[in-house]
Image: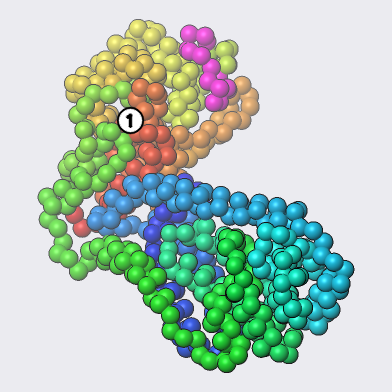
Amino acid sequence: MNLSLLIPALGWSLLYFVWQGLVVGVLAASGLWLLRSADARARYALCALALLACVGIPLAHLLYLLGADELPAPGLSVAALNAWMPSLVLAWSAGVALMSTRLLLGLAWVARLRRQAMAAPALWQARLDALAQRMGLRFLVPLKLHDALASPVTVGFFRPLVLLPASLLSGMPVALIEALLAHELAHVRRWDYLVNLLQSVAESLLFFHPVIWWLSARMRIEREQVADALAAQALQDPALLASALHQLSLQAATQHHSQLMLSARGGTLLLRIRRLMVPEPMPGRAGWKLAVPAVLLAVAALTTQAQRQPAAAPVPAPAQLAASMLALPVNARHMLVIDDSSGKVLMAKDADTIVPIASITKLMTAMVVLDARLDPNEALRIVRADGEPTQRHGMLADGVKVPRSVALQLALLPSENRAAAALARTYPGGRAAFDLALQAKIRSLGLKRTSLDDPVGVSPANTSTATEVARIVAAAARYPEIVRITTAAQASVAVNGKSRTLHNTNALVGHAGWDIALSKTGSSKQAGSCLTMRMKSGGKHVTVVLLDADGAERRGLDAANIRTALAGQTHF
């Protein structure tokens, strides 16, 4: 599972669910219409399955995308959406956080009701126990009184509790109160509180889709119908429960009740009374209005889907294709993509501005050292002059000796600064001779806008352009040793007699779907996050240069968007 794809995969799963949820809603509405004369339990089960599908479909889609190690390659017309996925996921996360806060506050309010409630008189507890036994409950359900309620409610699932308004004991006949309590026990028997809580979780996760709210509301209506039927069966007198509901509806109750409580007043009260007295098919309701926003969102998503299929459209001319690829948004402030075979620029963004390049400098250092044809087995001693030890690896302390070949690996793979400095310091003639050789290499490559003051890249004066970095990469690709080192995801080397594992600073190397032929990263406060590499995508061998991105994650997402765009247009 590739967790680096989590944000774009989550974004696409949410976007796809816009139309997937509509399909589930249409199927559920059709099923409810066919079951309009059936038992309420059948409609309730259908709503529950549909809501479960709404949660399961995007989850399965997300796991599929993560398990594939790469996102499916879209056409250029929607590749730009990838750049917006972090914003989409951030907006969704904010909504989930808000809905979760609402849910937690509701749970806290219910918990406070439990604490504030008083034990009911023993006579009424005995009546509730007798009802529970009659309805097949094998455990006792406590009955408590609360002054702030307007109707009986059920809270909790591991330790269910029925709360009864104290005012009902003196304001309603005993038989009608028992009928309302039977309704609450029906909820306990069916574990409805737990299901209702899970509904609230689904609403929090998929708050943006109207179908979720319609299904959830319809499910609560059917739940009350099922509880009414069970209570009426236990009482053997549907008219008794209908009378209790009618009298309850006449009470002047203005309190607001959390959806986390199950109440005898839930659902459409008058419809429930009528169905208790005269069972009939569920009348038509204006629920279709709730689907209108979902239809509009689904049309937009389906339109995007249609744009992803370029097969029916004429193949764009190379110039048109190049123009469309130039419009691909990336986070990096400077970008260049070149076809290695033809030298044609496929994408560019401010590619000729001179900016710091950080550790990409080490490609030049490696070429200068390899040009000297020095003994790769010669031991190089690390000294204080090689810079401060890095906390990231901590393996090159003062006095440590490593072969020149290992120092080269350390400089290119984990981008160890002290290793690069040691390579320059031990150059024949010392650092001064290395600097002269470095300037000569710059001139030989025709780099007019590249300036390198140190072999490591820590100096902000080490500058170049995206265009000239591409030339550096082309030159480095002619060195088999550089290619071998930078295309390994990791390597094991011996440092001071201990085996150490080195990891490539480019996390894309070695991942499924990535065919990388050379790679180097760089990062500093002045340079931002940089990446250059040669790779194959869409049948093309290309050089990619990304300079000054906002962190490794955004840099990697830029590279993924570029690869996706290339893979979607293999014919140019």
Q: Residue 145: x percent and y percent?
A: 76, 63
Q: Main secondary structure of the magenta part?
A: loop
Q: Which residues are magenta?
A: 383-396
Q: Closest to the observer: 15 or 424?
A: 15
**Above or below — where is 483 with respect to 105?**
above
Looking at the image, which residue is at 40% across and 57% down? 12
Q: Is residue 190 left or right of residue 460?
A: right
Q: Closest to the observer: 359 or 106?
A: 106
Looking at the picture, the colour scheme in use is: rainbow
Looking at the image, which residue is at 42% across and 75% down? 287
Q: Which residue is mark 1?
A: 548
**Above or below — where is 36 with respect to 70?**
below
What element does badge 1 sit on? strand
Looking at the image, which residue is at 51% across and 49% down? 98
Q: Residue 492: x percent and y percent?
A: 55, 34
For residue 8, say whether it is visible.
no
> Is residue 393 highlighted in magenta?
yes
**Above or below — where is 490 with respect to 84?**
above
For residue 220, say whether it is visible.
yes
Snapshot quadrant of residue 466: top left
Q: Residue 51: x percent and y percent?
A: 52, 70
Instruction: Residue at the far front: name it.
Output: 171
Looking at the image, which residue is at 54% across and 82% down? 271
Q: Is residue 48 left or right of residue 327?
A: right
Q: Amino acid at mark 1?
A: Asp
